[in-house]
Each structure stands twice: as C-alpha cells, then as structure tokens.
Image (tube, helix red, strand yellow):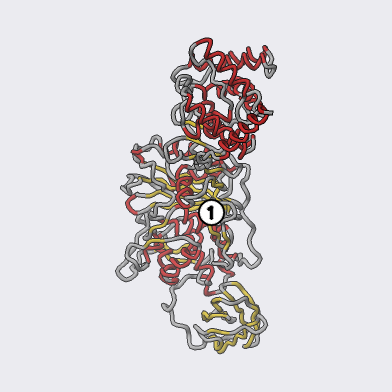
Amino acid sequence: MLLTGLAAGARDGLDAWVGRTVLPPLAIATSVEVRARDGSLLRAFTVADGRWRMEPGPVDPLFLQMLTGYEDRRFARHPGVDGRAMLRAAAQAALQGRVVSGGSTLTMQVARLLEDSGTGRLAGKLRQIRVALALERRLTKAQILDLYLRIAPYGGNVEGLRAASLTWFGKEPRRLTPAEAALLVALPQSPEARRPDRFPLAARAARDRVLDRMVAAGVLTAERAAAAKTEPVPDSRRPFPALAPHLAARLRADQPGAGRIDTTIDARLQAALEALAARAVARQGARLSAAIVVADHRTGEILASVGGAEWTDDARAGFLDLTQARRSPGSVLKPFVYALAFDEGLAHPETLIEDRPTAFGDYAPQNFDRMFRGTLPVREALQQSLNIPVVSLTEAIGPARLVALVERTGARVEIPSGRPGLAVALGGLGISLQDLVQAYAALARLGQPVTLSALPGAAVAAPRRLLRADAAWQVTDILSDIVPPPGAPPRRLAWKTGTSYGHRDALAVGWDGRHVAGVWLGRADGTPVPGAFGADLAAPILFEVFGRIAPDFAPLPPPPPATLILPNSRLPQNLQRFRPAGRLAAPPDAPEIAFPPDGAGVALRDGQLVAKVRNGSPPFTWLADGAPVARAVRAREVQIPLEGPGFVTLSVIDAGGRAATVRVGLR
C-alpha cells in the first residue's frame, strides 16, 4: 500500500510538474514563398534572422521511415521520452565515463531546438524532458514531427527539411533517393561538422552509417543500400529558385503578412524569357538591360514578368524592376490615335491623308527619316509609323482625349509639362512597360479594357468599352500586315515598335488572339543607346517571345460584323480624304443635320434616335461613328437604332456625296 501511495504521489507530482511547463513559442516563422501558377516555387525569402526556413510541404515517405528508424524507433508509442533509450544511454555513460548516446527522442530534439538549449548538461537534459512531455500532451505526433521538419539544422543558415533538400539537391523533398534521404537524416546530428560542401568525407561516412542501419532495420535491402553508397555527396550549395525576382519582391511588399503568395506566372515561360533577356543584352554593352511582360488578354493574367536582364548584375542596375519604370514609349502610342480616329468616324484605313511638311502652330514635327511620302492611305501611314499624319489626327481628336483613352485602360501616364500637347502622339509622356501592355490588351480585346494582374482572380475587365470593336479590329488588321523581322517565326501578329527621343528606349508590343506582350531595351539610367531602334533591337525579341509562347499561340480574330471593308473609291465622301475639322467651308446647298444639334444631349426612345436633315439631295446615308446605320433613305426624318448612354458621332451623306456631322450625347 505504501509503495502504491508513493507511486501515485510521484505520478501526480510528475503530472503537476509537466502541467506547469511554460512552453517556448510554437509559431515558427518560415520563409515567404512566391509560387507559380502550377504551385512550383518561383522565389523564397529568408526569415528575419537571415535563415532559410520553409514550410515542409509533401515529404518522401522513405525519408520519414528512415528518420524514425534511425532517430526514434518508438516515436509513435512513447509519451515524449523513451525510457529504454534513456536507460541504455545512462548505462553507456556509466561504463564509458562519457556520453555515448543521448537517448533523445525526436520530441526531445524538438524541445532542444525550440529553446536552443544544450544537450550535455543534466539541467539541460531535464528541461528537454519536461518540455518534451508537455509537447506530447498538447500536440499530436504529426504536429511534433512537423516542427522537427521545420527547424532541424542542416548547416549554415539552412533549417528544416525542405530548405535543406533545395539547398543540397536543388529539388523538393517529395521524392528523394535513398542516398539523399540518408544524408538528410544524418546532417542534423552534426550540421556543421558534416556539411557536404566543407567536409564531404564526414558527410559521406554519416550518410553511409544511416544506410547500414536501415539495412539492419529492414527498411532497405543490402543491394539498394550499396547502390546508394555509390552516389556522390553534393559538393556545393544550390541557389534557391529566383524566377521573376522583381515581381516576387513587389508582391511580397504589397502583402507584408502573407506567408505564401500564389501567382499566375507560367514558370516554364518565365524561365525561358529570363534566359532570352539575358542573351539579348549579352553582346550589347555592360549597361544595357531588357524587360518583358506577357499576359493572357482574355483573362488579364500576367504569365511572365522579366524586370531586367540579370537581376544580380549591378552594372545593368539589375535590382531595378524596369517593367514598372515610366519611360517614353516613342511611336508605340500611335495605334491609339488611329483607333480613336476610326472610332469617331474621322478616318478609315483606306482614307487618304497627307504626309507633307506641316507646322502645327510652333510645332513642326519631322518623320524619323526626314522624308515625306505625300498623299497615302491611313493604313500605310500607320504601318510606316509616319509622324505628320498621326499628329494631324491628334490635332483633330485633341491630345487630351488620347491621354484620357490610355488612362481609361487603367494605365498611369506622366506628362512632363503637366498638360498634354501634340507631342504625346510621338512619345512625349512617360508610361511603364506593364501599363503599356495593359493598354494594348484593350486593343487586342477589340476595345474592351482589362486590368492585368499576376495574382489569381485579381484581373478585372472593365464594364464599358473604350472603342468600337470594328475600330480596334481595323488597327489590329493594319498592324498584322507589317512584314516581320528577318528570321522571325511564321506567325501572324499585330505589332508595333517605338524608339524614344535620343535612342534612350527601344520598344515592341504585339498580340495574337490570346496573348499580348511587350519588350523594352535600354539603359536603366535613361542615357542614350547609340543606334538603338525598336525595329532592330526589340522587334526580333518580341517575335522570339511569341515563339516561346507556342503551342498556346492563337490566331487573330475575324472582323466584327459592323466593320466597313471598302476601297477608298467606295467610301463615303467624308472618309475618302482626311481634312482637319473646320478647314473647309461647306457649300450653301449642302446637307445640314437639323436635329439633333451638335453637342446636344438627347434621350433615346425605345433604343431609337430621331434624326432630321435639311438641304442636300436624297437619298441619304446615315452613319453612327463611321458605320452605316441607314442607307438610301429618301425621307428627311429617320429613326436610327443606337445603344446608349454615351457619345456618338452622327453623319449624313446626300446623293452628291456632301456630308454633315454632329456629335451628341445619348442618355
């Protein structure tokens, strides 16, 4: 009875002693991880103290079997302390006069690692026992094992199984060879003395001892262990993955509390384009850099973002994210001028326009080659990227409206003078490459803008169109007929190049039926790159980008139903030749729109607009934003079906080809 009472008292005292244990913090900080769309690791960041410590993730079952078989065979059954192992360790210490084996369980090792306590002193061992017993009461075996997989030391600043597997083998620990698993079991016992990059013989010997023990335990066959011993141990640390490093750093800064950030980045494409950017600048001088953005314009997902060529190269300012730098786009904004002109019925791809020396007040732009082509179709003016025609159209449209269109795509622009002038059509503003690609996504989507994002589900399609679908398609059609660079893959892209003033920036932007991509080359400090042209430098890279996108390449869309596809001779007279507004006086008997008046706000009735014309000779043709909506009408009053609300340019053409135009707001 006395012994029973003493045993019960000892048990109760032990329970109380364990119950009063103050555990160390169990919330272990782990590296922030940025993941690709397939879940693979793009980039990880060290924790605050500079250590690599990562979430375990899936682990090879062989490793777990070897770990428990070598370190703690009764892990699943003991309460945190293995009495038999402790007695064996005590007996060995008494016989040898020193500690031969510690008898520590995995739970005790976790306790030691959590408190960073020693192993050889009695007080330290008692503390480990107490904490281990408390851990077993408060956590499951799986949770204790998870802690070990997070914090076990593997040499240097590497902690945890997953960080170790990436460091020493460059792979996730989902599938390990027996040799790899054995080394990862052995390293935590003496992480510095067995570091394979410094002490390969010690690492190999420790690994082989684990393999021998696994043969004795029946985990491995002798043949399999012998084969594992022939594998070399790693002789250096592998770098951690660092794909899309600039984007990863930006996303991490935007989400400071996130431990894992999933993205829409295609890891395969990202790696290929980073290699392409590095190769593109390798022979172009030590300071040249490159940036690339690729997105799926149907969904708004960013598929690749290369912030610079060689992000560790200080000479190229590799630390800067050049997809976000606002630079001059050169001629790359010209397609938006033409899209507005088509949208407002000011021009058509076959409209004739003048390319002659012209002064716009004090502004007298020149073409890039200082030559003039005379009269030519708008189609050719855009394909040849001529300056005089696009400035003429910008004057008619208004430079503020061009800037407003670009900003309505979600892009942010920076105008040096604060007020847009005609030079904005030629690149006289600042815009980032990512925003430029986002603006082009609206053209690729036939006038429907979308906000690009690298975060799943974060891309947003705007509810309203910026342009009529046929106007955006006409720009696409024109740019898809430009001859590709020599040697380019045989794919039909719509594409445009640009070179900023002083050869500081070389750009190319293009799209197919699914993807939109932008390429920038230049110097991060904005100094000139002599001889740099978008067509020579950036365009070939753009076509290589689309070569890397294959086999997901998609054809460009067919023309929308409302598209007016006619030769110049069959166009309405006001679209046959571009004449800036107000320069020609209308003849006295020319048609005049009596209703609605120019600039008026008009309410639609059942989706119909009542329009009236006076003077002119019937029959009349009515156009809304350049598209015919009523033909061969002899009456002077007509009901025109229109969609509102918004603005519309309404035109009427009489039998003699004379025209009148008003712009009204619909509600």
Residue at 50% x, 68% y is 341
Location of the N terminus (image quadrant): top right
Location of residue 329 with respect to 580 vertically, above or below = above
Location of residue 166 with respect to 530 vertically, above or below = above
Assign a secondary structure to mark 1: loop
Type of residue at label 1?
A: Ser
Residue 533 location in percent, x, y? 39, 47
Residue at 39% x, 35% y is 283
Observer-nearest of 455 and 498: 455
Observer-nearest of 578 and 313: 313
Location of residue 648 with respect to 305 vertically, above or below = below
The number of numbered discs placed on residues in the rendered structure image is 1
Residue 302 location in percent, x, y? 54, 50
Residue 295 location in percent, x, y? 55, 50
Location of residue 357 with respect to 67 vertically, above or below = below
Quarter holding residue 374: bottom left
Observer-nearest of 130 and 409: 130
Left or right: residue 369 compared with residue 141: left
**Residue ID for mark 1:** 453
